[in-house]
Image (cartoon, helix red, strand yellow):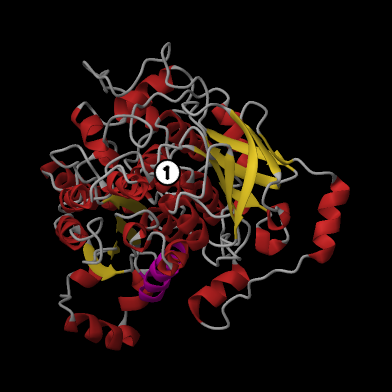
Amino acid sequence: MNRKYSKDLVDGPNQSASRSMLRGVGFTSEDFKKPLVGIASTGAKVTPCNMHINELAEVVESSINNNNGKGVLFNTITVSDGISMGTQGMKYSLVSREVIADSIETVVGCLGYDGVISIGGCDKNMPGCIIGMARLNRPSIFVYGGSIKPSEENTDYVTVCEKTGEFSKGDLPEQELIHVEKISVKGPGSCGGMYTANTMASAIEALGMSLPGSSSQDAVSNDKKKDCDDAGKAVMHLLEKDIKPSDIMTKSAFENAIAIVIALGGSTNAVLHIIAMADAIGVTITLDDFTRIGKKTPVLADLKPFGKHFMSELNASGGIQPLMKTMLEKGLLDGNCLTVTGKTLADNLKDIKPYKDNEIIRSFDKPIKENSHLRILYGNLAKEGAVAKITGKEGTSFTGRARVFNSEEDGVAAILSKKITAGDVVVIRYEGPKGGPGMREMLKPTSAIMGQGLGDKVAFITDGRFSGGTHGFVVGHITPEAADGGVIAIIEDGDEITIDANKDELSLNLSDDEINDRFAKWTCPKLPPKKGVLSKYAKSVKSASLGAVTD
């Protein structure tokens, strides 16, 4: 059995002191002869997404120990987008992806683990875990903590955000808002729609780095416990065969992940994270890959935020495996890609049956959208690209007058005080990876717009990013960002902006001379933090168009 790294830590008389320390945490003499598998848990009581993950990690540990390995459980961090949304705390959210990756790499690299299983729940956990495992390139599996079920009234976290907008408009009594607040998030699990957590879980399953069927499972279920038990067995097989992330995370595998994200109507954050995960393993994925794959991949899933259904409903009807089988047959997936089962994607899907009476996944002849909802826009406002989430429900083009804000807080205040009207393009800037720093999600302002009934009447652009729960006519990830001297920095109130998802263009309708004149007078109004994690991040982070990586 593969003990490539642990043997240097525990073998021979010279490592007696190391073994003595390990005996202190319960190792036996027999354990030193087994492969050591690190189990990175993101379990924490800070958020429902992760409150149960330490329990799942213990199931993984037992499975490894019962299959001739030695599991070693350790924790990494998590934060909560849902709790910090709209506050200064949100600046730490994307940063946490890098901290998670760094911490997994640090522990596993230091302690000589031969393999890795990481378990994640909330949004940044998943790409953070994958990036960490990619850097290490040891036999590895990702386990998703699972999805929360909707409330009995079919509400969820995003419902609460949008009800806040209704309240601000005067259309909802405060007691009804409090009622929805109380009932919408109960118990463990990640947000239940096709928001970022479920988007990334699905992408990772399609990538081949988690076990088949794992991405749609309910957080509290026997299926999820079995997934954890199976992961412990599977990692031992990977160790035996020396199958590493670099064998699985190929260019074709990432293209499979992109296709699944599009078919499911997934989050704009997937663009950022897939580029970053690919970078970690040495594969180049660009914004243009999303456009290329999007031209031939329809949106098929009627899932929230712009659809009707929750992930738990899709799971009950078969999860994403039947969809993947159909996409494979249609030539939209590469079935030759290796997966953590030790088999190819095609082998994994061989015996999968079609959906029965499924109203969630549309047929290819009646798609929700014939091509991708994730539009990569270019133009004088986005010379290095921007990411739009446009389903067509609100139209495919918009021209309006700019309403400019230099922070999320200022934009939210204007929306909630009813200062935004039909025909406006809300511009929130200095919220990019460097300018924020941290590239905050804009769920609070976009939900307020939807809650006020302006979703098809107002557009929204930012150098920040969006929650997977965001919907409407929205464009994010504008690069170069304002703090880097992007054109978004010199927009003024009343300027005309055009968003065209048919031509994939984002334009500030000013002459080059006027733009240059404004830049001659411009200085960045924001100074980066001088100390701490946000300071380090601002100094090292790359453009959103490159995945906002820090390597």
Q: Where is residue 181 in the image (x, y as percent from the top left)?
A: 21, 52
Please identify the dominant SS of the magenta region: helix
Residue 105 colored magenta? yes
Picture residue at 41% right of the left edge, 68% below the top: 89
Q: Where is residue 255 in the image (x, y as percent from the top left)?
A: 52, 35
* Quadrant in which the C terminus appears: bottom right
Q: What element carries label 1?
A: loop
* Quadrant in which the N terminus appears: bottom left
Q: Is residue 280 visible?
A: yes
Q: Mark 1 points at which residue?
A: 470
Position of residue 80 in the picture relative to residue 383 (left or right): left
Magenta span of residues: 97-112
Q: Quadrant of residue 341?
A: top left
Q: What residue type is labelled 1?
A: Thr
Residue 402 colored magenta? no
Q: Position of residue 305 (x, y in %)?
A: 36, 37
